[in-house]
Image (tube, coloured by chain):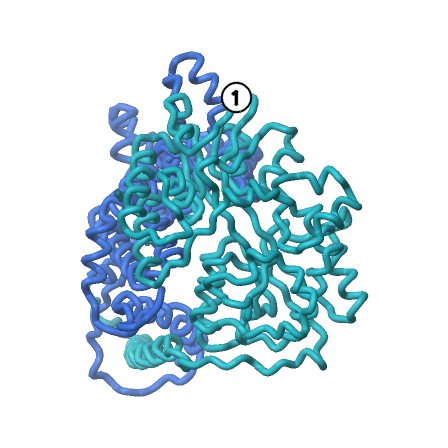
Chain colours: A blue, B cyan
Amino acid sequence: MAFAAFSSSTAPAAADTSRKKSPVALLLLLPGILYLVLFFLTPLISLLLTSLKAPSEFGDFGEFSYAFRWENYVDVVTAYWPHIMRSFGYAITATFFALIISYPLAYFIGVKARRWPLLQSLALVLIIAPFFISFLLRTLAWKQLFSDESFLVTSLKAISVLAPDAHVTGTAFSVIFGLTYNFIPFMTLPLYTTLERLDVRYLEAGSDLYASQFHVFRKVTIPLSMPGIVAGTLLTFIPAAGDYINASREFLGGTGTQMIGNVIEANFLVLQNYPAGAALSIILMTAILVIVSIYVKKSGTEELL
Amino acid sequence: MKSKPLPADPMIRELIRRAQNSTMNRRTLLSGAAVGATGLALAACSTGPDELTAAPDTSDTNKKIRWDNWALYVDIDDAGGYPTIEAFEAQTGISVEYTEAVDDNNTYYAKVKDQLSLGKDIGADAVCLTDWMVARLIRFGYTQKLDHANMPNVANLIPSLQDVDFDPGREHSVPWQGGFAGIAWNKEQLPNGIKSVKDLWSPELKGRVGVLSEMRDTMGLIMLDQGVDIEGKWGDDEFNAAIDEFTKQVSDGQIRNIKGNAYKEDLVNEDTLAAIVWSGDIVQLNAENGDKWDFIVPEAGGTLWNDNFMVPIGSGAKSNVEEMINYYYDPAVAAEVAAYVNYITPVVGAKEAAAAIDPELANNNLIFPDEETLSNAYVFRGLDNSEEQKYNAAFQSVLLGSV
């Protein structure tokens, strides 16, 4: 069902027509298929099989054998449902803020700045420039900026925006901030590419028909930029939901902000509980696929993807 | 989208028909591929033989050692070279490829465990890991038996470490460096200092306390504070009492964060003012950031741990490694390393050798601890398989905030 949302759904109508083979097409497809089998399908099946493993009867720490222990899924959902909900909560919030921030930015660069191509490219460079620095370093830098004795936090405390004993690092705020900050370009760039092609004559036509500015924006600009919005939100939401760097205790998170990615990491690397980690990965993947396909269906843009 | 009627042009009709045909072929090919992938996935996960045998020793012909160790854990000079390793290479003609590949026992284990379980080479001939992890590797038969005849200097090993419960007679492992877990605090912000784990729970420090993500150190210190002898026969009751205290301090927000090596950043940027830490780090932090922190092993006791050399089952360079271990058990060499890494050296006579280089160094109680300090440091007792799973799970669930 999830896959159906993406397929262009051409029915296999002419299945009974002539069975002539086309060896060239097969040959050309072969490298791609081999690649997919080796690096996508095999790990996926391996993950699925691991998620159903049971602890070996006389096994030592971290030893499991093949079984059909579907209870693994029940166990991880019971144990970690708050983390699953939190992940999607954080990811949706971060995507929302990224959209709120990126849309005006992309609109300015793509529409308002059209007359000054130099300004346009300069603004784009400014958006991409931070990405020449490692993701980890940038996140660590924010951790320093948000630390208790930092200029930012002490100033906010001095003007009573923050309570004297309040913290910023290790809170939901800092994690969502980190997610928003780190994924903003994935929102801005697709928005920019659609807004850049926006035909302003449509907006003029709207105004000529006595639509208010807000009305024009809602009825003309938004629908025309929908492909960018959909692509941007997907590119932000999907990695944000599975992210484990921002929420990690070593970076912006704390014990109260752990996301599903952190739980998977702990299960694979520390607890050596591979079935639990694998089951959580499959759940995360399925949940994202379902959410995304519903979203794509609802926004009615499957043909634009 | 509905399928449209085919266009009238016969040539285009034929092209479309062919295209549709090849989709069919793609489908059959894909389903075949799926079957193949299942086979591959199963093959990749097959289990190895139960009894592992050590790889044949090719030390005589291949004069090479690949050594995986923790960061900043051997002497490094200003040019980025390793003086003691270079001296060893010149002396023996064995070349050493030193890699700072270990940053956590668990993650390193997760990386190499599949090769180890098959008895394959893990890309290292000597690895230094902590006691409990070495205990696990020995239990699984993942290490090679060392020949003490090739390492006469190992007689210099301090007596208390010669016979450990996980490796009687040191047949599979030899200590590299050790250290304490204790408490450090910021002297400027907390002039009155900290004396015990209980002091960390004082209201003034709410939200400014850090603890280690290494279960044995954090839980060890809390249990010691609760009067438990962590070397002795404690069980679930004692562990649960400690984990309850720990959970309470985390959920009350008293403990700000729980970290591995990264706790140092929190001390430096003052997110934490006091923390459970490793002794050698504080010596280094003070050297880099001005003398800002003090460290004690609390009166109720601190934990003592060692990182140990071991030779993985798939390595073919055992004799070379034995020669290197022997070299590092020369007191003069051990002193040279201790002067740089600031952890406890397990070599008898290193203190005297260090006094010759720098008397102040030999008097540093964290590098060459006196009897009194040592008598207050305890080794977390070995855990069996079910305990390890149970206690790890309990500790991790606090770290993940799911209690």
Question: Of all residues shown, which one is farthest toward the top?
Answer: A159
- Is B259 located above or below residue B15 in the figure? above
Residue pictured at 72% horizontal, 75% vertical: B63
Residue A111: image location, x then y, percent: 43, 33
* Amino acid type of the residue tagged 1 in the rendering: Gln
Residue appearing at x 47%, y 38% in the figure: B276
In the rendering, at what x and y percent does residue A253 appear? 39, 38
Dot 1: what SS? loop
Q: Quadrant of the N terminus of chain B?
A: bottom left
Q: What chain does badge 1 belong to?
A: B
Residue at position x 22%, y 78% in the image? A14
Is residue B328 toward the left or the right of residue A224 in the image?
right
Relative side of A58 to A71, left or right: right
Decide if residue B68 is on the left or right side of residue A75. right
**Res A202 → quadrant:** top left
How many tags in the picture?
Answer: 1
Point out the image quarter for the C terminus of chain B: top left
Q: Position of residue B170 (x, y in %)?
A: 55, 67
Q: Which sits in the foreground, B285 or A216?
A: B285
Q: Residue at x 29, y 26 (%)?
A: A207
| Residue B340 image point, x, y percent | 69, 46
Along the line of sight, which residue is nearer the eye, A5 or B348?
Answer: B348
Q: Nearer the viewer, residue A63 or A127?
A: A63
Asked if A242 appears above or below B125 in the picture, the reply is above
Rendering quarter of residue B96 = bottom right
Residue labelled with disc 1: B189
